[in-house]
Structures are given as structure tokens and as C-alpha cells.
Image (cartoon, rainbow, N blue to C red):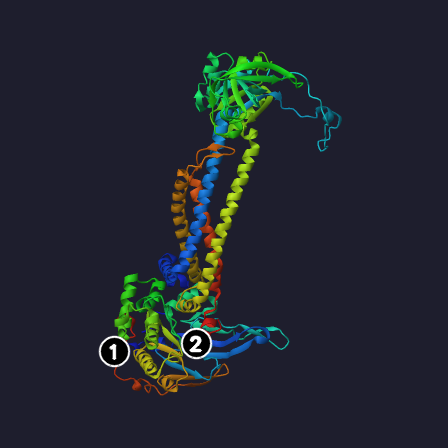
Amino acid sequence: MNGPTISGGNLKSKIQNPQSKTLPMLWHISMRYLLAHKRQTLVCVAGVTISVMMFLAMFAMMQGFRNKFIIETVESNGHVVVDDEPRERQTPILERAYPDPHAVLVLERPKPREQVKQIRHPVGLLAKIRALPYVVAAAPEVTGSVIATYGTKTFPIEVIGVEPQQQERVTTIGEKLVEGSFTRLRSTADGVVLGQGVALTLGAHVGDAISLVASKLDGTPGGRAHARVVGIFQTGVVPVDYSRIYMLLNDAQTLLDKKNIVNRITVRTDDYVQARAYAAQIEAIGGYKTESWQETNENFLKIFAIQDLITYIITGAILVVAAFGVLNILIMAVLERINDIAILRSYGFSRRDITLIFVIQGLAIGLAGACLGLVLGKLMIEGLRRLRIPMEGLVKAEGLLMSESRGMYLTAFVASVVVVLLASAYPARRAARYDPVAVIRGAH
Amino acid sequence: MATRARTTSTAAATTPILRARNLHRILGTGDAASHILHGVELAIEPHSYVAIVGASGSGKSTLLYLLGGLDRPSQGDYDPNDRYVPFDPPSRVFIDGRDTTELDDVELALLRNARIGFVFQFHYLLKEFTAQENVALPMLKRGHVSRSEALDRAAHLLDRLQLGGKLKRRANRLSGGEQQRVAIARALANEPAVILADEPTGNLDKHNSERVAEVFHELAAAGQTIVMVTHDPAFARRARRIITMEDGRIMADDRPPDGAASSQVGPQPNLPDANPRALS
């Protein structure tokens, strides 16, 4: 009757019970427990689903606006800009007097040099920059501030003098025209292409003549021009559309009193993500302050980083609330299953098996909630994408800009499953710690 | 089957399945500590049918749980000077010759699964599972048979216990007597070396108590080793060995003359054959 005696050697090897065989049974028990309380389980799953859905929708929205801003900024401003001022320390004289590297040196009220800043030998520098292997194109520019007047309206703006063909190779400004043509700058005397925001503010249209007055360094009025509007561009980036006009390089040099002067070179590279490194190399070649688009838009990028953080915090909070729901329900489940735990222990379930039964319940809730959340999140993104809500803030758009990535789906899935698993760990460990004898005696 | 079981070699028959050596158990700590068992010495041989009797609080159930590896022996106590003094010789339980104190939680659980079948006063079935599934679970845990084989064997065991018509019924929809018989079938699932029963009739009415007692008697007659704790003198008298406990000590260990107990076993037309092969 009595089975073979088990003695000597390793018991685990004598009684074959690999975890791989036990797991399906533990999963089966867990599912039966979960389905015994369908309503509670559904609430748990719904909590996880909502948090995943909210994360996806919010993240897609944030990412959409960020991408729009970055792409339009990069494409309309160029990847790297060589400026006309040497990147030098502001306190070289003080540093010679006080060489201590830890000294705090402050120069108060320095008087700027009264001379027109420019890039010396721009043709040579352009040739050097264009020869770099990662440079796709480089274009000369002259920039300055002018006051635009149309009728009774005046507006301070930045004028950029460009060679249209070269400019179209470094930026996509030529493709952003909503009226007129960028190349007409070359065929029209004192032609000007306005940002849509500038055109709206002034009330000017293609064919209208606007008055431009440059200001000298001392603040007195400088050159004047009666420019003909030959085009209106819209990048969608509000700070660009509301502050910028383009003229032919020669016309702008005349208007700004910067004859034959180039004070900026815009560069397009083969990879805008690498712009920081490229800018440093170009700066080393030219000796002029060279900024990548990231450096120029550092403040905006910081805002986006903060937005991302806020998204993580809000959706994380929702997920934590959902996790507490799971924790609460699993604690209740453990209390309800004390007798079951004792009997399972009596016929050979180890503490690890009991832990797994409750962890599997957490895993199942997490997986179900995460999968449902991914599907509903995707549907929500598509729904929001279809909404036509005109928006004008940092970027201008006709609706919500939703941008998806595999990473965000993966993050939402992994984070939700991991958080719910962590939430199930405490009740699972508590379940495993119950002393079966105490339960059977009725001490619990 | 019973005859074949009893014809095993004398050496094997005298090797105890369970053995307690200087067994102590102290529950609680500090001032609340209670010394439940005081150096119990006990051996349970194969095919024995043992009843442990005694007043409430005498340590019967504690002894049973320790013998089944569900609890662990205490290894020492504090003397009046608050010094920890280990028990000498060490307090030990051996299952199939294995010292349970040397086994970790997983090893001990595996040993319980393979060699011990517990039956409790409050049957403790998993209420979300059917009678058949409740019986199959220990087999599935052991992993030596497939799910369908386990369910088949569970059906067979339940059928032998006159529950063949209630295989698919949820445990909480069975009567108390039926639930206890399901619990007995579950205890038999892995062909255990010994069944440890704690007041198996304590929560049943007279009719169901008689029925459960009859099942135990039939199992014992077939050679199944059984150790049970009971308050029911009539039930206890059917055992072949009666251990009386008082204040955590064995006060009497009565073994009726050989054959006396077996002579009480009547015909067993529906006897669940305790031979594992015959059951499967």
C-alpha cells in the first residue's frame, strides 16, 4: 500500500515537480479566483486600462506638439547657424588680472563696440563649411531689425536677407509659402516674403507695398525701403511666423546699411540630431559662435522636458491609484482565501506557490488592463486626431497633433504591468506568510 | 489487497513512516509562551491504524501537524534565568526517515504532497472548484500525471466514495458529509504513505460521522496507514492502536492483541482499495 520510501539524496530530485509543470496549475487557480469576483476584477482591470489609455493619449499629444515644433523649427531655421560674433568670454581683461579659476568675475555696464558686426571672408568660410562631409548645404544671410509699416499699422520684425536658391537648400521655407512665390524675391525689386503672423498683424497681402525702416546701432532711423509683398509663408511655429520676413540678400544689405556684409551662415547637415556635435566642429573651423538648433531653442526644449515630466507624473499618479486598487482587492482576496491557503499548504503547496498564485492574479490584471489600455489608447489617439480644433500657441495647427511611437506603447505596457505586479507583491507575500496550522486552529 | 499489503517484509513493516523523537512544541513567545508538547516519543509503522485521543488542549492536533510536516518542532526553551536551552536530544520529526528539520519549505512541501494526506475537521475544500478538481489538485501539484489523468483518477476515487454523481458539483454545493468524503478522496489522491486526520467527524451529524468512520475503517482494512485525532470514543475504538495524550505527553499507548482490530473489519463491497495501483 504505502508508496516507495523516500530517503537519502536530494528530495527535490526524487520528487519530480518542476515549476514549469506547476505553473499552468497555479495560473488555473489564480484565474478561478479572479473570475470568482468578476466585478472587483473588472474594476481593477479598468483602473489599469484608464491609466494606460491616458498615458498614451497625453504622451501622443505632447509628442505631437513637440515634434511639430522641432521639425518646423529645424526645417525653417536650419540645423546649425554660424553667427557674426566670436564666442569669447566677457571678462578676458579681468581674467588676466585675476587668474584664479575659482574667482567670480563680474563686468558691470560694459559699453558695446560701435562697429558693424560681420563674418569676415564669408566666401572662404562657406567653402570650408560646404567641404565638411556631413554638411548638405550652407547659405549666407544678413539679418537685422526693422520696423514694418503698412497703412497705420507698424510692427517690429527681423529681416533676413537671403539668396533664394541657396536658402531653399538649407531650409524648407520655400515650401512653406501659402501665397506667392519665394523665387519672386529675385525677380521683384525690394520684394519681401512675410510670415503669416506678420501679414495678419499688418493686414498686408501679396502685391501690397509695405514700408521698412531699419534702425542704426545708436537707435536713429537708418535705411528705408518700400517693399512689395511677393509671398506669405506659414511654418506653423508661431514665434517664426510672427517675427520674420525674407528679402533678397542685396536688398537687405542695402536696407540694413550692411553693404557686402554677411552676418550669418545657415547650415543644413545630414542629421539634425547630431547638430550639437557638428556645430562645435564648425565653430572650431570658423572661430565664430556657432549654435545648433538645440542650443538656440534650449528654453523650449526644457519646457518640453517639463511637459513630459508632468505627463509622467499625472499618468503615473493614475497608475498608482489603480495599483492601490489592485493592492486593496488582493489584500481582501488573501483574507478571504486564508482557509484555501492553509489547505493548499497542507497538500504540498510551498510558500513560493502561494506567492505565485497571488502574483499571477496581479500579472493577469496588469496584462489585461495594459492590453485593453493599448487598444483603447490607440482608438482614443485616432479619435483625437480627427478632432478639428484650431490651435495657436507655440505652434499653429488645425487640430490636435498626435504623434505615436513604438517606445511609448512599450513604456505604457511595461510600466503598467510592472507597477501592478509590484502592487500584488505585498498581498502575495502576506498570503505566503500565513501559518497553515494557525489558520486551521482558527487563530486567523 | 489488504492481504497483500500485510504480507510485506517484516523489516519494511517495522520501519516507521513517521517518527517523533523528543518532540517539543512551544507556541507563542515570552510570557505568552505555551509548552504544548513535552518530549513526545512516537513511531507510526506502515499499515497501522492509530487513534490519538485526549482532552482538548492535550496536544493531539499539534502532534498530528508536526508528524505531517505542516508545523516545525521547537528546538529549545528559556530556563528560569531566561537562558535559551536547546532540547537534548534534539526535537525531531522524521517522515520516511527524513529529518524534517533538514528540509527547506519547498522540500517539506514536496514531501507532504507525495507522502502525506491530510483530512481536517472543517474539510476546507476550494469552493470555486468542483469536487473532481479539488481531488485532482494534489496530483496536479505533484506533476506526475497529466491533467486529464488526474481528473480521471479523481473521478475514480470519488466514485469509490459514492460521489460519482457529483463530480462536477462545486464544493460549496455539497453537503457536509459529502464535502468530508471529497476531502478524504483528496487526501488519497497521491497514494500517500499515511493519512493524518484531525477530528474528521467532529463537524458532522451522526449519520455522516458513521459513514466517514466506515470509510476510514475500510481504508485501514485495505492497508492504508491512518493516524487520526478524535474525540469520538466509538470511532477511536475502531483503531488498532489508541494513544492517549494528556498535557502534551503520551499517557497510554494501547495496542489491542494482533488481529483484534482486523477482526472488526467487516465485508467491504465498495471498499476504496488502498492499493495505489488498484485505485488508478
Read off the residue under disc 2.
Answer: B64
The answer to whether marks 2 and 1 mark residues whose Cβ atoms lie closer than 8 Å is: no
Q: CA distance from mark 2 to mark 1?
A: 28 Å
Relative to A242, A221 lies left or right: right
Percent position (x, y) of residue A218?
Answer: 67, 18
How crowded is the residue under tag 1: few (<14 C-alpha within 10 Å), some, or many (20+)?
A: few
Report in which chain the residue with disc 1 lies.
B
- Quadrant position of residue A254: top right
Where is residue A202 drawn, in percent x and y?
53, 23
User: Is the C terminus of chain B in the top left, top right, bottom left or bottom right quadrant?
Assistant: bottom left
Q: Amino acid at mark 1?
A: Asn
Q: Secondary structure at mark 2?
A: helix
x and y, in percent, of residue A412 in the image: 45, 46
Tell which circle, 2 or 1, labels the residue nearer the N-terminal end. Answer: 2
Compare residues A351 and A244 and report the one nearer the observer: A244
Q: Residue at x 38, y 43 (%)?
A: A379
Q: Nearer the viewer, mark 2 or mark 1?
A: 1
For this orientation, the residue located farthest to the left is: B269
Q: Nearer the viewer, residue A248 or A431?
A: A248
The N terminus of chain B is located in which quarter? Answer: bottom left
Kindly indicate whether the residues beneath marks 2 and 1 are on one polypeptide chain.
yes
Instruction: Identify which amino acid the numbered label 2 is placed on.
Output: Leu
Rate crowding at label 2 as few (under 14), some (14 to 19) or many (20 or more) other CA atoms within 10 Å. Answer: many
Please, which chain is the residue tagged with disc 2 on? B
Name the one closer to the observer, B145 or A335. A335
Asked if one can make out residue A411 in the rendered structure from this viewpoint, the answer is no
Looking at the picture, how far across and down is residue A172, in whole percent?
46, 23
Q: Do we see residue B151 in this rendering?
A: yes
Instruction: Say which element carries label 1.
Output: loop
> Which of the labelled discs sits on residue B270, or is there none?
1
Q: Name the residue rendered at 35%, 88% in the picture.
A: B257
